[in-house]
Image (cartoon, coloured by chain):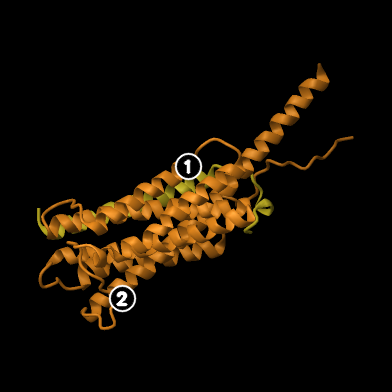
């Protein structure tokens, strides 16, 4: 496998790891959507 | 007569993602665009380096990730010091979020370094002073997350985890100076030199990756801290509901 292909795969792994972590935060937050009201959130 | 009670657990219309606001959505879109641009610059715009050849393309994201990891870790350390002083759960939530994000970024950073080492040095790992001290910091941060998950009173947990976070922050100057203190395979300081010997587009791409990863870290910490607030709020509501149910059982008996 060429060096460039390995570099591309490396970037794909980085995006997958951090993207997966970001999506897990969003999904876990969405689980609370049914139990909180917008006016209760301190950041809205 | 029909009693109208305010519902605590009513879903508000349009509340699809409780951790986000219009501003954080804009921040998220800007961050995503910056990251895509950083990857395009690294893979397709910047030239190969004379000795490292195409492996140098790993270094843009590598530098960006460690910069963001240090920023979040320093934020975690400052917040942890404030937690020890003020003992406020809100500060602890942000400290925990910053610590978790720093761990993820540092783990991915180590992977990019390993891949670069494989392409340049021919080995995935070397017990070089800088790499070893960075790996030690990663272990300390994993320990920080483990300590945060331990049982105990919230006050004791806040104190314990804040002390571990400060130990982690103390590791940063050791890592920074490791290439000067010990004989190292790792390259010496590059970006902190007065006369940086880098091609213009390479230097621009490096700083662009640093900005993109910093935006990413900020977005992640913000949303992770909000998730921690939602979890705490959910736990306290569940506790209140359980107490109410117990009281109801007691009065009915």
Left or right: B90 in relation to B71: right
Q: Would you say residue B171 is visible in this rendering?
A: yes
Quick one: SS at disc 1?
Answer: helix
Quick one: SS at disc 2?
Answer: loop
Q: Position of residue B245 (x, y in %)?
A: 73, 27
Left or right: B150 in relation to B45: right
Q: Position of residue A22 (x, y in %)?
A: 42, 52
To which chain does the residue with label 1 belong? B
> Quick one: which chain is yellow?
A
Which of the two residues, A34 or B66, is positioned nearer the viewer here?
B66
Q: Which residue is mark 1?
A: B147
The quarter of the picture where residue B215 lies is bottom left
- Examine the rendered structure and indicate whether residue B18 appears above or below residue B56: above
Which of the two residues, B169 or B216, is positioned nearer the viewer here?
B169
Which of the two residues, B84 or B250, is positioned nearer the viewer here?
B84
Q: Residue at x 35, y 53 (%)?
A: B137
* Of the image marks 1 and 2, the number of the one nearer the N terminus: 1
Identify the mark at residue B192; answer none if there is no mark.
2
Q: Position of residue B109 (x, y in %)?
A: 30, 56
Q: Residue at x 20, y 73 (%)?
A: B46
Instruction: Check the image and name the residue furthest to the right.
Output: B1
To which chain does the residue with label 2 belong? B
Tell me how far mark 1 sits from mark 2, CA to CA.
35 Å
Which class describes the residues within 10 Å of circle 2: few (<14), some (14-19), or many (20+)?
few
> Quick one: which chain is orange?
B
Which class describes the residues within 10 Å of circle 1: few (<14), some (14-19), or many (20+)?
some
Instruction: Check the image and name the residue furthest to the front.
Output: B181
């Amino acid at each position: 496998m060429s060096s460039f292909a390995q570099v591309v795969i490396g970037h794909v792994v980085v995006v997958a790891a951090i993207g997966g972590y970001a999506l897990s935060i969003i999904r876990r937050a969405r689980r609370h959507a049914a139990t909180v009201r917008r006016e209760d959130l301190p950041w809205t | 007569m029909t009693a109208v009670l305010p519902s605590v657990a009513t879903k508000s219309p349009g509340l699809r993602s409780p951790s986000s606001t219009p501003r954080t959505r804009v921040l998220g879109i800007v961050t995503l665009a910056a990251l895509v641009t950083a990857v395009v610059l690294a893979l397709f715009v910047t030239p190969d380096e004379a000795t490292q050849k195409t492996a140098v393309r790993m270094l843009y994201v590598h530098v960006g990730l460690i910069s963001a990891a240090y920023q979040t870790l320093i934020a975690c350390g400052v917040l942890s010091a404030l937690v020890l002083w003020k003992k406020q759960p809100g500060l602890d939530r942000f400290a925990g979020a910053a610590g978790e994000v720093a761990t993820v970024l540092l783990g991915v950073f180590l992977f990019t370094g390993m891949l670069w080492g494989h392409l340049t040095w021919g080995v995935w790992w070397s017990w070089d002073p800088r790499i070893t001290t960075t790996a030690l910091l990663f272990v300390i941060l994993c320990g920080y997350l483990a300590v945060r998950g331990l049982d105990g009173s919230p006050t004791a947990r806040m104190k314990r985890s804040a002390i571990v976070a400060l130990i982690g922050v103390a590791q940063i100057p050791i890592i920074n100076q490791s290439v000067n203190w010990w004989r190292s395979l790792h390259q010496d300081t590059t970006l902190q030199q007065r006369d940086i010997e880098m091609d213009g587009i390479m230097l621009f791409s490096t700083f662009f990756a640093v900005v993109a990863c910093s935006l990413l870290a900020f977005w992640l910490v913000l949303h992770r801290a909000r998730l921690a607030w939602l979890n705490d709020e959910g736990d306290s509501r569940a506790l209140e509901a359980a107490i109410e149910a117990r009281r109801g059982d007691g009065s009915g008996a």
